[in-house]
Amino acid sequence: MKIAAWNVNSLKVRLPHVLDWLAAQQPDALCLQETKTEDKGFPFAELEAAGYSAIHNGQKTYNGVAILSRHGLEDVQRDIPGFADEQKRIIAATVNGVRLVCAYIPNGNEVGSEKYEYKLRWLAALTAWLKDEMTRHPKLALLGDYNIAPDDRDVHDPVAWKDKILCSEAERSAFQRLLDLGLQDSFRLFEQAEQSFSWWDYRAAGFRRNAGLRIDHILLSAPLAQKCTSSTIDKAPRKLERPSDHAPVFVEIAP
DNA sequence: ATGGCTTGAGTGTCAAGA
């Protein structure tokens, strides 16, 4: 089973890239973040024609998450239960017996800001919910844009980014608390090239200079991690005209 | 120190991203 996550930074703009990537990579499921549209603007028909059913938790202009699947989607859940939130950042469903939780974790803007406090509250609510969710679904994957670089290895310039947003101690501790639930960072199950990143700033030629961060992750519960055979960041779509600033990431899980 | 670029909204220019 091949499962993937991609922050597309507007699905309307990026639909051609998504369709090309689905055709090339043939994932069983793809989790999208930042669709930036309401359901009425979501390209259900085009995805269906490509062989994918889809569920969406959308909103106008900002955020918006979706899961695409070639094998149907069961037990659909939108948002974090019991956490009051206007922003559409979570959608979950079961595909082939695997619970997929698609997350667009808040950016946080600046350490100490109101948005930063929201990010930390949001992460605490996510963690509490997942603890419960994992008892119901032992085979669980948390995929998406975490807006956290877990380690200095995941940062092109750790000195410049020290204690900055995406790299602060509190954010990294929140990431660790997700791992403490029994989730594993699939990317670090395997030997990886140094300076591997999943996001590069549009500005100042970030991609050309590989001035990036690894902030898009696929965390796997133990039964999935044991069967995981690869975890990959696909930089190819970042090289296209009008790319998303994020690359898709994917894992392969043996039967 | 700041902005660099992209998107959506909406038609002038700003918020938000990371």
Image (tube, coloured by chain):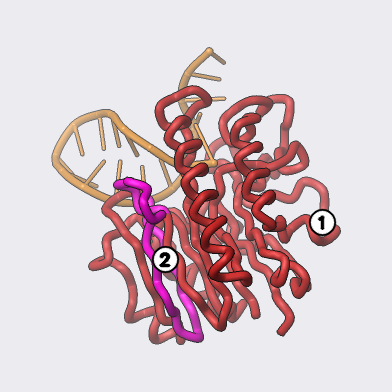
Chain colours: A red, B orange
Q: Which residue is mark 1?
A: A192
Observer-side mark, 1 or 2, equals: 2
- Left or right: where does residue A231 sit relative to residue A19? right
Quick check: A68 left or right of A99? left
Image quadrant occupied by the N terminus of chain A: bottom right
Q: Nearer the viewer, residue A183 or A55?
A: A183
What residue do we see at 65% from left, 37% from top?
Answer: A173
The residue nearer to you, when weighing A185 against A21, is A185
Tag 2: amino acid: Ala
x 40%, y 72%: residue: A76
Secondary structure, mark 1, is: loop
Q: Residues within 10 Å of mark 1 (few under 14, many from 20)?
A: few
| Residue A43 higher or lower than A177, as above or below | below
Which numbered disc covers residue A176? none
A33 vs A4, left or right, is left
Residue plotted at (59% across, 81% down): A26
Q: Is residue A10 visible?
A: no
User: Amino acid under label 1?
Assistant: Gln
Q: Position of residue A154 (x, y in %)?
A: 72, 43
Q: Look at the numbered disc 2 and give the secondary structure of its residue.
A: strand
Q: CA distance from mark 1 to mark 2?
A: 28 Å
SS assignment for the magenta stretch, majority: loop
Q: Position of residue A95 (x, y in %)?
A: 52, 79
Magenta range is A63-89
Is A20 rendered above or below residue A101?
Answer: below
Residue A27 picture quarter: bottom right
